[in-house]
Amino acid sequence: MDWVFTDDRPIWQQLSQQLTRRILTGVYPPGSKLPPVRELAAQAGVNPNTMQRALAQLEQSGLAEANRTAGRLVTEDLQAIERARREQARQIIADYLRAMEELGYSFDQAAALLKEE
Amino acid sequence: MDWVFTDDRPIWQQLSQQLTRRILTGVYPPGSKLPPVRELAAQAGVNPNTMQRALAQLEQSGLAEANRTAGRLVTEDLQAIERARREQARQIIADYLRAMEELGYSFDQAAALLKEE
DNA sequence: ATTATTGTATTAAGTGATTAATACAATAAT
DNA sequence: ATTATTGTATTAATCACTTAATACAATAAT
C-alpha cells in the first residue's frame, strides 16, 4: 500500500489514518517496530514534522509507543488496538447521528436510511 | 429557537444549518418570506455578510430563492425541501461509511455498530 | 422620478491551522 | 566516552478560510 493523498483535508490526518489502517490490518503487527520518523517521512514524501504529528496522533490513540532512541513500537496489547478502533468508531458514529439530527432525522430514521444505500 | 453557536466550526455553517432546520420544521413555512439579511444578521448578532453566506448555502440547497428587493422566499416546492434534506443526508451517510471503512469496518459492520449505541 | 429596502459583489483584515526549517535531547551501539 | 540514531520541541513561513467593512445594483413602494 502506497501513500496517497487528497487535498480535501490535512496531510497529517491522512497519514495518521493510513498508519492506523496498517496497524489494524496487520501490516505493522502488534509489538513490531515502526520505521523511524524520518524514514516514514521520506517514504511518504512529506516533512518529518508532518509525519511526527501523524505519529503523535497514533500515540494518542494508544496504538503505538515511542521510546527515545529505540524507536516506536506498535502496542502489543491486542485489546488496546481493538479499543482504539472502537473509540474512533464511537466518535464517527456520534458525529453521524448529530449531523442527521440536525437535519431533523431521529435515531431510528438515521439507522434506517443507512440501509437504503 | 434562538441562535446559539459553538466555536468548533464556522458561524456561517451553523447559521445555515439552523436556518435549514427552521425550514424543515416549519418555522419558516414553504412560500413564506424570510426576514431580510440584515435583520437576520442583527438577530443572530453576526455580520450581514456572514448571514449572507449562510443564506447563499440555503439557495444552493434549493430551500430558498432570492428576489432582488422582494426579499427571500422559502421554496413552495415541498418535494424540493424533501429532496434537499435527502441530499444532505446522502452526503452525511457517504461520509460516515467512508470514515468507517477507513477503520476497517465493512458496510454491514458499520450499520450494525450504529444500533449498538 | 425618488427613495427606501433588499440582495450582491469586492476587498481587506483577522485568525487559525498546516507545514517546514532548524535545533535540541535522549540513549543504544560501538 | 563517543557517535549515530532516534524522538521532540521551538519557531517561523505559508496558506486557506472566516469574518468584516464598504460599496454597488436592482426594484418595490411612494
Image (cartoon, coloured by chain):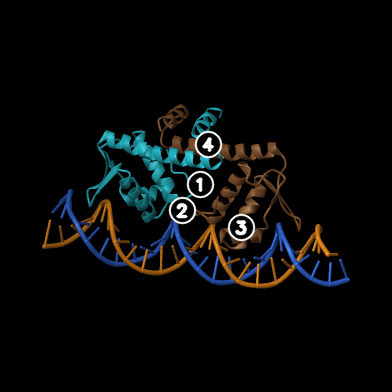
Chain colours: A brown, B cyan, C orange, D blue
* Tags 4 and 1 on a common chain: no
> Measuring 54% from the left and 31% from the top, which residue is drawn there?
B113
Camera-side residue: A11 or B18?
Answer: A11
Report the amino acid beneath label 4: Ile
Q: What chain is tagged by disc 2? A: A
- The image's mark for residue A8 is 2
Mark 1 lies on residue: B6
Report the amino acid beneath label 2: Asp
Q: Position of residue A113 (x, y in %)?
A: 42, 30
> Measuring 54% from the left and 51% from the top, which residue is drawn there?
A14
Q: What chain is tagged by disc 1? A: B
Mark 4 lies on residue: A93
Element type where label 3 sits in the image: helix
Mark 4–mark 1 Cα distance, whole angstroms, equals: 20 Å
Mark 1–mark 2 Cα distance, whole angstroms, equals: 23 Å
Element type where label 1 sits in the image: loop
Q: In terms of sequence position, does the residue under pointer 4 or pointer 2 come before the other?
A: 2
Mark 3–mark 2 Cα distance, whole angstroms, equals: 18 Å
State if disc 2 and disc 1 touch (CB < 8 Å). no
Q: Position of residue D8 (x, y in %)?
A: 70, 59
Q: Residues within 10 Å of mark 4 (few under 14, many from 20)?
A: many
Mark 3 lies on residue: A51
Tell me the quarter of the image containing the N terminus of chain B.
top left
Q: In terms of sequence position, does the residue under pointer 3 or pointer 4 come before the other?
A: 3
Report the amino acid beneath label 1: Thr
